[in-house]
Amino acid sequence: MVRWISARDNLDDMAELRGMTWDHLRGYRGLEAASAEYARTHGVEIAWDRRSLQAFADAPIASLARAYDFVVLDHPHVGLIAESHCLLPLPMPDDLAKVSLGGSLESYVWRDKLWAYPIDGACQVAVMRPDLCSRPLSDWESLLDGSFSGISVITPLLPIDAFDMMMTLVAGRGEVNLPYAADTFVSNDNGVLALRILKALYKLGPGEAVTWNPVDALEAMATTNEFAYSPCLFGYINYARPGFRDHRLDYVDLPTFRSSALKHGILGGAGIGVSAFGRHQEDAIAFAQWVASEPVQSGIYIENEGQPAHRQTWLNKANDPLYRGFLKGAFDTMDSAWTRPRDPWFLGFVDDVCEIFPAFFLQDRDEDTFLAEINAVYRSHIQRTAAE
């Protein structure tokens, strides 16, 4: 990373900053441990509040930026952030090739400015119980022709996760430039195929999976013997660590299509942004650079349940028995991750698609008809944006 901007020589002159992160130990424990070390060495106290995983995706960053010095955020917000100027543009690291994994840093760039440093790296990957599953799914078509059987499968299909998986599947067919056309979010061929795969996964798992997020599925896999494999979910490093739960999980690459070797799991993770309204902006930028740096990511951050975003940490820790089930098993898919749209209209569009997604499963909606509805929702958002 670039050289840290400031550190306090007089530790008695202590700045006090506040940050907002998300309420999973992956989201807060590494930050809290790093902050305690930073207070000891740099004289800057940082307290962290937490919001739910749903609020992490939905809560307006502009409102949070008026109440906090730091906001841990999801990269689809950057279009709105750039419009509102609620966060500060940050200095660009001078070693991008060593820092960024799967476009994680680039995902926070909008209008040629960097709005957050990546501190948490994730994408949709596959996961398996090594004691129950020796044969992960190789290709998606096997779900449709019945050639993959005998393994208990669970897929989190909460609307946001189902829609993210739909985009992962479309990207795996090479359709990475979404929207597909001015009046179409996803092409008919790839969209229908993705929905057919989602419907097949729904029928393989319990009906309540339509209310499950990745943590629910991972908990079920790690604490019971009901499920051996999940072909697509956002990975959590904690479950790969021996002793975290009753059973350790291994992350593996996404299945591919028979006609395509692409593994474009939709990029997730989190970045740390600095409020444009804070009183200690130099101190805040310095901490954001420090916590995103390789020594911190490879040390106190990952050692306290953090899920690192720094490329060198993933490489340096790949064979560590505490983390290799995630960092090594998920590396190739993570390095090929796909960044979803970040335009200002996108988050509202996602909210509206999520409103209609449960009916696709629960009412066994026809794939062609449902895809037409998704594309109609997209058109309404584009038209609304053009009129504003």
Image: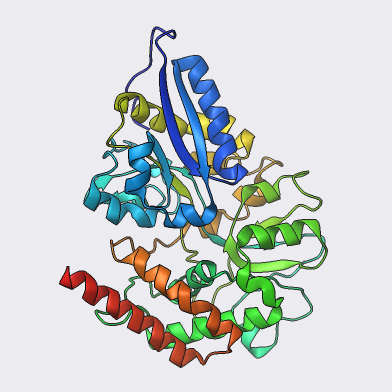
- The percent position of residue 324, horizontal first and vertical second, equals 66, 46
In this rendering, the answer to whether 232 lies above or below 78 is: below
Coloring scheme used: rainbow
Name the residue at 67% across, 67% down.
Answer: 230
The N terminus sits in image quarter: top left
Name the residue at 34% across, 84% down.
Answer: 376
In this rendering, the answer to whether 43 lies above or below 380 is: above
The C terminus sits in image quarter: bottom left
Q: Is residue 151 visible?
A: yes
Name the residue at 55% across, 31% down.
Answer: 32
15 with respect to 92 (left or right)? right
Q: Quadrant of residue 340?
A: bottom left
Q: Is residue 274 visible?
A: no
Looking at the image, which is closer to me, 138 or 203?
A: 203
- The percent position of residue 241, horizontal first and vertical second, equals 71, 45
Q: Quadrant of residue 196?
A: bottom right
Q: How many marks?
A: 0
- The percent position of residue 328, horizontal first and vertical second, equals 61, 50
Looking at the image, which is closer to me, 341 or 381?
A: 381
In this rendering, the answer to whether 42 lies above or below 255 is: above
Looking at the image, which is closer to me, 169 or 321?
A: 169
132 with respect to 46 (left or right)? right
39 with respect to 277 (left or right)? right
Name the residue at 76% across, 52% down.
Answer: 248
- The percent position of residue 146, horizontal first and vertical second, equals 69, 88
In this rendering, the answer to whether 230 lies above or below 369 is: above
